[in-house]
Amino acid sequence: MNLVYPGSFDPVTYGHIDIIERSSKLADKLYVAVLLNNNKNPMFSLKERMDLIKSSTSHISNLEIICFEGLLVELFDHYDLQAVVRGLRAVSDFDIEFQMAQINREMNKEVETLFMMTRLEYSYLSSSVVKELSSHGAKINKFVPPEVYKAMKEKEKR
């Protein structure tokens, strides 16, 4: 089974890495699909985000990092995919993700969504929280891989 794990990953966190590692064990091939959203002002460029994911997940052999723009369901037309993986941190995530899963299924009847519960130690973690903490000088090295930490500190110097 081929799975896709979509997201902005700005930046990729240990919570993301956990979902990637666990879902890669269920998949023949796992695609990590990095969203290019021109309406957002990301800290990292698309290429930087893809490179940071690649360096943070180099130990996973059945992983391919791709990018996409537009609708997630369109990836099913271009890749041999069987399901979308979505991480859930809290009940509030489920409400949003449930709606998205229903919309995706309505747009393409072949799109299945698999929900994976985030490990308890990452249940509060998000890219937005990491960026906010970092902007105030908080130590974030326990939330992101070393290469992401270094890249964030370099961005903040500019």
Image (cartoon, rainbow, N blue to C red):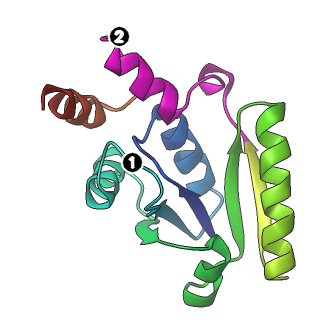
State the image coordinates of residue 60 (x, y, percent, origin top left): 42, 55
Q: Which residue corresponds to the image point at 71% horizontal and 76% vertical from the top-left?
A: 82
Quickly name the residue at label 1.
41
Q: Residue at x 50, y 64 (%)?
A: 33
Within 10 Å of the Cα at label 2, are there few (<14), some (14-19), or many (20+) other Cα atoms?
A: few
Tell which circle, 2 or 1, labels the residue nearer the N-terminal end. 1
Q: Position of residue 17 (x, y in %)?
A: 48, 42
Identify the magenta region. 117-140
Q: Considering depth in this image, is 43 or 149 the residue closer to the camera?
A: 43
In the displayed structure, 67 sits above or below 123; it is: below
Instruction: Let me know if residue 62 is in the magenta part.
Output: no
Task: Name the amino acid, label 2.
Answer: Ala
Where does the image place residue 67, in percent across and percent down from the top left? 43, 69
Helix, strand or loop under label 1? loop
Badge 2 is on which residue? 138
**Residue placed farthest to the bottom in the image?**
77
Q: Amino acid at mark 1?
A: Asn
Q: Nearer the viewer, residue 104 or 1?
A: 104
Looking at the rendering, in which quadrant would you find the C terminus? top left
Residue in the image at 82% along x and 42% along y:
94
Q: Is residue 5 left or right of residue 108?
A: left
